[in-house]
Amino acid sequence: QERLKGFGKDSDFVPRRVHVVGAGVMGGDIAAWCALRGMTVTLQDQSVERIAPAIARANKLYEKKFRGDKRQVRFTLDRLIADPQGHGAAHADVIIEAIYENLDAKQALFRDLESRAKPDAVLATNTSSLRLEDIATALDRPERLVGIHFFNPVAMMPLVEVVEGTDSDADAVKRAAAFVRAIDKLPLPVKSAPGFLVNAVLGPYMLEALRCVEEGIAPETVDEALLAFGMPMGPVELVDTVGLDIAVAAGKALAGDETAQAPRKLLDLVAAGHLGKKSGQGYYRWSGGKAQRGS
Ligand code: 3HC
């Protein structure tokens, strides 16, 4: 309890610049949140076109937060810089990787980031399914890598898991926790174990919901039951929100072998490119950011 309350408070680390790699749902929303909380943020992806949807989402978030005060919105958007070349990595106090869940791609990225980052910058991955230790093998100084694991939707979820790998340097973990506090989130210290804490609990819950659907119960029925029980969102809608590809990867990390665990329909939907909210179709059809019941 004491460690939880104080985690990240006993550090003099004052982060100001953040570099996020990967402008998908998580990376884009992490970048947007950091800029909202006063950081200067560079957001890297393969092209400006790939970054544009994240900036558009940030714009919407800021308009809501600042109730249409155009000056404040503009001012905050100015701190969120599209950076396809990744120039920001050299100046950042914190670098967060949030690209797709592929070990080779993450290793290659961190090799490059380490060569360009300031020697004392926090190097963090937002992975939910790959082992920190495996990603860290790409680094000259593997002890630099920590996990900073956000939840979807980033703007609404107060908790962030700060993941300590077996090799992680204690000071790097402390600085990561201080950063999480600096952006007004609550850092939870976790060890590098499958699912960390939250997904280890949430994963089986979502999986059982998908099994109910597999057995012929409509997604709406499952979701309505759990909503009536008091959950903030139905578990099937949550899978769609998180992303079906992410759910498969997280399930694999938890179970060791996704094909043994994952429901057929989940795998079929992913194979068809139906990844949930972000692609417009998952267990539900999505329109205007809302799941369409009876779809
Ligand atoms: N971005 C920003 N704000 C959002 C949002 C988003 N994507 N989605 C909803 N909101 C805001 C709404 O604008 C609204 O704000 P207001 O109260 O100021 O008007 C507020 O959230 C409530 O929205 P709604 O009334 O439309 O809907 P809900 O009451 O259902 O709340 C929710 C939305 C907060 C997302 C809630 O449904 C919830 O907590 N769901 C569970 C989310 C969850 O469990 N996430 C963890 C997933 S696991 C994960 O991410 C880890 C990964 O590794 C797999």
Image (cartoon, rainbow, N blue to C red):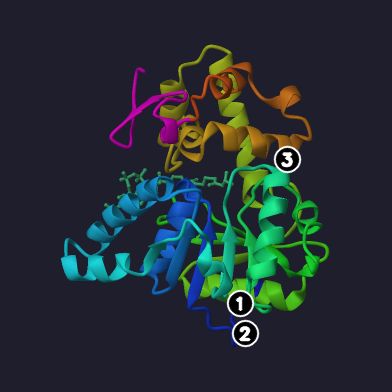
Mark 2 CB near ligand 1 (8 Å cut): no
Residue denoted by label 3 = 253
Is residue 154 among what the camera can see?
no
Considering the numbered disc 2 on the image, is that residue within a helix, a strand or a loop?
loop
Is residue 96 among what the camera can see?
yes
Considering the numbered disc 1 on the image, is that residue within a helix, a strand or a loop?
loop
Mark 3 → mark 2, Cα distance in angstroms: 32 Å
Position of 56 relative to 234 (above/below): below
Report whether 193 appears left or right of 1. Answer: right
Write the residue at 41% across / 24% down: 284
Q: Which residues are magenta?
A: 276-295
Mark 3 CB near ligand 1 (8 Å cut): no
Mark 1 → mark 2, Cα distance in angstroms: 6 Å
Q: Residues within 10 Å of mark 3 (few under 14, many from 20)?
A: many
Q: Residues within 10 Å of mark 1 (few under 14, many from 20)?
A: many
Q: Residue furthest bottom?
A: 12
Residue 174: quadrant of the picture: bottom right
Residue denoted by label 2 = 11
Residue 61: quadrant of the picture: bottom left
* Three-letter residue code for mark 1: Gly
Mark number, residue 8: 1
Residue 56: % across, % down: 31, 50
